[in-house]
Image: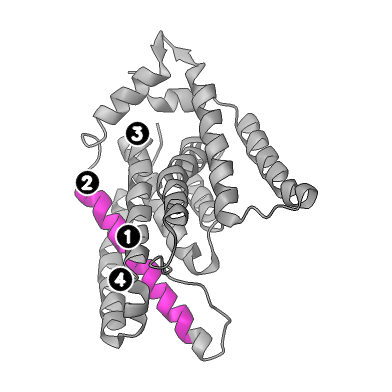
Amino acid sequence: MIRLNDFLDRLSIINVLSIFLLIILILSLIPMIFNIHLGNLFFKFILYGIMLLFFAYELNKIDIEEISFKTALRNEFDSIFEVSDIYHISFIVIANILFVSAVYFVLKYLSHLSIISFNSPLFGDFTRLSISILALYFLTVVILSPIIEELLFRGIFLRRFNKELNVTLAILFTSVLFGFCHNFGGILGAILFGICVAILYIKSKNILVPIFAHFLNNLLSFLLALGGIEYFIQSNSIAIFLIIILAIVSNFVLFKAIFSEWPKEME
């Protein structure tokens, strides 16, 4: 059976990285040449939007045994919940958000003691943002980010590193790389999430599974920020205590599952 993985394997990692870095370079030069400040969110929106068009164009050019990319995509979409469990995906997302929250409160406490300097938001407060900024954030972080980041880190990097190294090193290397692409407070959570979705991908053999998990994670974070829950939590010591306890319990279960489900090979 022809899978999306077969199409991803036909992409040149050099071409993908070259286009990605070229777009970053051009977008970085625009403010210097035209004196226009794009802003981090708009910068990411343009970068990921162009990369989506690039992936769509390159993958649509490929036919494998007379099977088109669109046909393979439709088949993978129809089987996404046959090869994965929505409850497992939801648990990973919730455990990850609890883990990130617990790490955040620990870092805030260390910052309060002047041991480190930490002033990043947990979810942020979107209650005062305009509709246009919210729409841009939703399109960029909730829609585009899961697609592009999973295609890059799991669909391309994980598969290539698995061929050059082994599955364990491939999972760890790509997850750490994925983690360091996030802000300081979320690095550990992103690494853990990267490991979880890598395992989901290897087990399901369907790139849409980690994309869906990533989408669900970002959507939940977006809704929490939209509800302004961060400041309610910060002013409620009982809520902080419960989040830390839930994070410990859920991630204990999650780590057990990671070790028991760790793949020995990747097809």
Can you identify the residue that label 4 sits on? Answer: 247
The residues bearing labels 3 and 4 have C-alpha atoms spaced at a distance of: 28 Å
Asked which secondary structure carries label 1, the reply is helix
Q: Say left or right for 107 vs 227.
A: right
The residues bearing labels 4 and 1 have C-alpha atoms spaced at a distance of: 19 Å
Tell me whether the residue at label 2 lies in contact with that at label 3, contact meaning CB atoms closer than 8 angstroms.
Answer: no
The residues bearing labels 2 and 3 have C-alpha atoms spaced at a distance of: 14 Å
Residue 163 vs residue 197, the one in the foreground: 197
Residue flagged by tag 4: what amino acid is it?
A: Ala
The residue positioned farthest toward the bottom in the image shown: 113
The spot of residue 18 in percent (x, y) is 67, 35
The residues bearing labels 2 and 1 have C-alpha atoms spaced at a distance of: 19 Å
- Which dot marks residue 206? 3
Q: Earlier in the sequence, mark 4 or mark 1?
A: 1
Q: Pointer 3: residues within 10 angstroms few (<14), some, or many (20+)?
A: many
Looking at the picture, does residue 229 appear above or below residue 167? Answer: below
The residue positioned farthest toward the right in the image shown: 33
Q: Earlier in the sequence, mark 1 or mark 3?
A: 3
Asked which secondary structure carries label 3, the reply is loop
Can you identify the residue that label 2 sits on? Answer: 86
- Which dot marks residue 223? 1
Q: Earlier in the sequence, mark 2 or mark 1?
A: 2
The residues bearing labels 1 and 3 have C-alpha atoms spaced at a distance of: 27 Å
Asked which secondary structure carries label 4, the reply is helix
Region of the chain picked out in magenta, as a range: 87-109
Q: Residue at x 35, y 63 (%)?
A: 226
